[in-house]
Image (cartoon, rainbow, N blue to C red):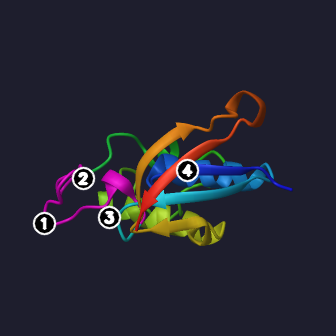
Amino acid sequence: MAKKVAVIGAGVSGLISLKCCVDEGLEPTCFERTEDIGGVWRFKENVEDGRASIYQSVVTNTSKEMSCFSDFPMPEDFPNFLHNSKLLEYFRIFAKKFDLLKYIQFQTTVLSVRKCPDFSSSGQWKVVTQS
């Protein structure tokens, strides 16, 4: 039986964590409080309480070669320095290629994460969420 892993957030770190879990034969579940992937790289016109966001004209200050995942290069036709919308597009391509969306519970907020009483022997955590 595969070990279950909780991943909080479907931003860049959450997406790569999901892929690594799957690659290692683990059973991940990602809890994403919004309706989409991308984290802070997903620009929103209207500010949401408790959510950081970039501004509309943000462009990366590292090249696409330095910004890509080591096992998943940026598309050739992408510019060297990416507008945030292109970086988000890259994340979407990555998530689709590795079928990561099926592991994400959207519009689910993590309220708490606590060690289970038998943590020292089980290694388990209790994750409380709200949808």
What's the residue type where badge 1 is placed?
Answer: Asn
Q: In the image, is residue 61 part of the stretch drawn in magenta?
A: no
Nearer to us in this view, 22 or 126:
126
At x 71%, y 35%, the residue is 123
At x 79%, y 48%, the residue is 24
Which region shows up in magenta?
37-58
Asked which secondary structure carries label 3, the reply is helix
Q: How far is mark 1 from mark 2, CA to CA?
A: 11 Å
Nearer to us in this view, 88 or 28:
28
Q: Nearer the viewer, mark 3 or mark 2?
A: 2
Nearer to us in this view, 102 or 59:
102
Q: How far is mark 1 from mark 4, CA to CA?
A: 26 Å
- The percent coordinates of residue 16 (x first, y second) are 58, 50
**Mark 2 Cα-neighbour bin, 10 Å: few <14, some 14–19, many ≥20:** few
The residue identified by callout 3 is 85
The residue identified by callout 2 is 51
